[in-house]
Image (cartoon, grey):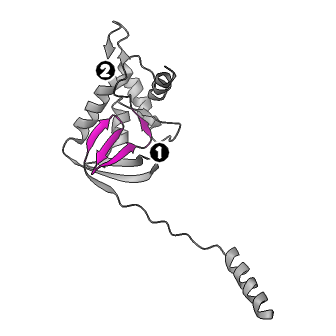
Amino acid sequence: MVRTRLIWVLAWACSSVPVPSIVLAAEPIIGRASVIDGDTIEIHGARIRLEGIDAPESRQLCTESATGQQIRCGQRAAFWLSELIRAHTVTCTEAGRDRYKRILARCSVAGQDVGAAMVSAGWALAYVRYSREYVEQEARAREARAGIWQWSFEAPWEWRRAQRQR
């Protein structure tokens, strides 16, 4: 009886002592990337969504204010990303998964943060719903009227919502 009680006391004591959890960081994903759209790439068959940014969708159009001309700004964002990474090796560090099970990651090419480059060039927006990482880059791009900021456009998340409602 005493022995059983001692075992229960020891079990309770051990369960209340904090044990440091060991978190193993995922290995970086490294390789040549294919561009899916302005905020998504693929390396070795892994679909990677650039964390903290949201680029216009491939089918999304922007409008030239003076002429009303429709510009394929989503396609241009993807082309710009493609030019940025070219045949360089891309290194991505996984930060989690999105609701579509895509890898969310911070990626770099030649030491440059790909998300920061996209937002700085005006081809993506800071995705402030999930991160405030690129807010300053977006403000500078907007002020310089870089990339999509030279036209009228809907934020990509608003454009997607409107497409779902159709």
Residue 139 spot, x, y in % from top left: 44, 30
Viewer can see residue 87: yes
Residue 27 spot, x, y in % from top left: 36, 61
Q: Quadrant of residue 6?
A: bottom right
For the N terminus, the image quarter is bottom right
**Residue visible at 31% across and 29% down in the picture:** 77
Q: Is residue 104 left or right of residue 83?
A: right
Query: Which residue is under mark 2?
Result: 72
- In the rendered structure, which amino acid carries the disc numbered 1? Asp
Residue 17 spot, x, y in % from top left: 67, 76
Q: Nearer the viewer, mark 2 or mark 1?
A: 1
What's drawn in magenta, residue-wise? Answer: 32-55
- Of helix, strand and loop, which mostly describes the magenta segment? strand
Query: Which residue is under mark 1?
Result: 98
Viewer can see residue 145: no
Q: Is residue 146 left or right of residue 51?
A: left
Q: Secondary structure at mark 1?
A: loop
- In the rendered structure, which amino acid carries the disc numbered 2? Arg
**Residue visible at 42% across and 37% down in the picture:** 53
Q: Is residue 33 left or right of residue 138?
A: left
Is 9 drawn above or below residue 105 in the view shown? below
Q: Which of the two discs, 2 and 1, labels the residue nearer the N terminus? A: 2
Q: Is residue 133 magenta?
A: no
Residue 64 spot, x, y in % from top left: 35, 12
Q: Secondary structure at mark 2?
A: loop
